[in-house]
Image: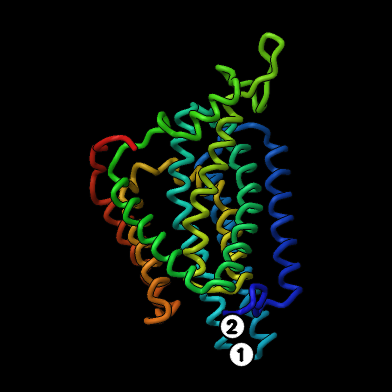
Amino acid sequence: MDSLFTTVAPTWLWVTFVAIVVVALFVDFAVLRTQGAHAVTVPEALRWSVVWVVVSLAFNALFWWAVKDTTGSAAMANEKSLEFLTGYLIEKSLAVDNIFVFLMVFTYFAVPPAFQKRVLMIGIIGAIVLRTVMILLGGWLLQQFHWVLYLFGAFLVLTGLKMWWAAGQAQSLEGNPALKLLRRVLPVSQSYDGEKFWTVERGRRIATPLFMVICLVGLTDVIFAVDSIPAIYAITNDPFIVLTSNVFAILGLRAMYFLLAAVAARFHLLSYGLAVILVFIGSKMMLIDVVKIPVLVSLGVVVGILAVTMALSLRTAPAAPSGKR
């Protein structure tokens, strides 16, 4: 197993990546401050989604050039850039289910559309920090204990099977243990106070529903990171590729949320497709020492599954939910 910090990316590309993330977050916050609280329209979400995809692909092109320049091998550059693209697509795909949970949280708490943008922005920053730590920890575990790959793979397969079973059932936060714990620990106001997380009622400082939403969004990302990070390690063990593909997928999460929220009902079969992707990736990890599945094949499988489930979603009507989970 390669060292945790062994990567084909030169130091200057690490610096460039960090600079891009800092600038991207600054632009997002500057736009947020300039626009103020407002409901994000579908055209606006579409424009930002295109921007983040273009930025991600441009970075991959820069990565390809850097690898070729450093190693002198176009074949190596092709392989590594393909790993980035596959990892990015997998993370983007798994983020879809994450977005559906965000939509459920926002609906449950009746979060005004004007406030959702700020919640997602804070959630993205938390996700970047959290996933960086988890990626490094996952890389260290794989370096020290190769058999952890099999555990990761088995976990992904079980998660995919569970996701398939739950896909046709109604979702509810009512019995969520984290929500029950938050309500038990924190006094919460009955109404929003603008975009504030804390307010004062009867001389007592208490949390607003928006703070509860932030906590649940953060918890949701922890849960989904446990799925998505092992998935990317099935494609590559290069820490630079694992980290950058994750972060670029996260940077476009806010825009993708508002885009998918508007058409969520039309792609009702996506959860089934994501379940199949997780089972495929988990199986790939468990068989890694027996069968080497090329990255190009993995990319084709992921794209094919997404294309089929989206096409079937558009051709069929959603079934009535069978129960709660």
Amino acid type shown at disc 1: Ser
Name the foreground residue: 216 vs 273.
Answer: 216
Q: Determine contact: label 1, label 2, CB under 8 Å.
A: yes
- Classify 10 Å Cα crowding around label 2: few (below 14), some (14-19), many (20 and above): many
Residue 55 can be seen in this image? no
Q: Residue at x 23, y 41 (%)?
A: 319
Q: Is residue 196 left or right of residue 296?
A: right
Does dot 2 land on a helix, a strand or a loop? Answer: helix
Q: Residue at x 49, y 51 (%)?
A: 224
Name the foreground residue: 200 vs 84.
Answer: 200
Residue 250 can be seen in this image? yes
Q: Residue furthest top?
A: 202
Residue pointed to by mark 2: 77
Measured as percent of width and height from the top left, residue 252 is found at 57, 53
Amino acid type shown at disc 2: Ala
Distance from the alpha carbon under mark 1 to that under mark 2: 6 Å
Question: In this picture, is 50 found above or below 318?
Answer: below
Q: Residue at x 33, y 63 (%)?
A: 305
Q: Is residue 172 left or right of residue 219?
A: left
Does dot 1 land on a helix, a strand or a loop? Answer: loop
Q: Quadrant of the N terminus?
A: bottom right
Name the foreground residue: 18 vs 161.
Answer: 161
Displayed quadrant of residue 7: bottom right
Question: In this picture, is 142 found above or below 267?
Answer: below
Displayed quadrant of residue 14: bottom right
Q: Residue at x 72, y 37 (%)?
A: 33
Question: In this picture, is 270 found above or below 146?
Answer: above
Measured as percent of width and height from the top left, residue 25 is found at 70, 50
Measured as percent of width and height from the top left, residue 60 is found at 60, 71
Label annotation for residue 73: 1
Name the foreground residue: 122 vs 29.
Answer: 122
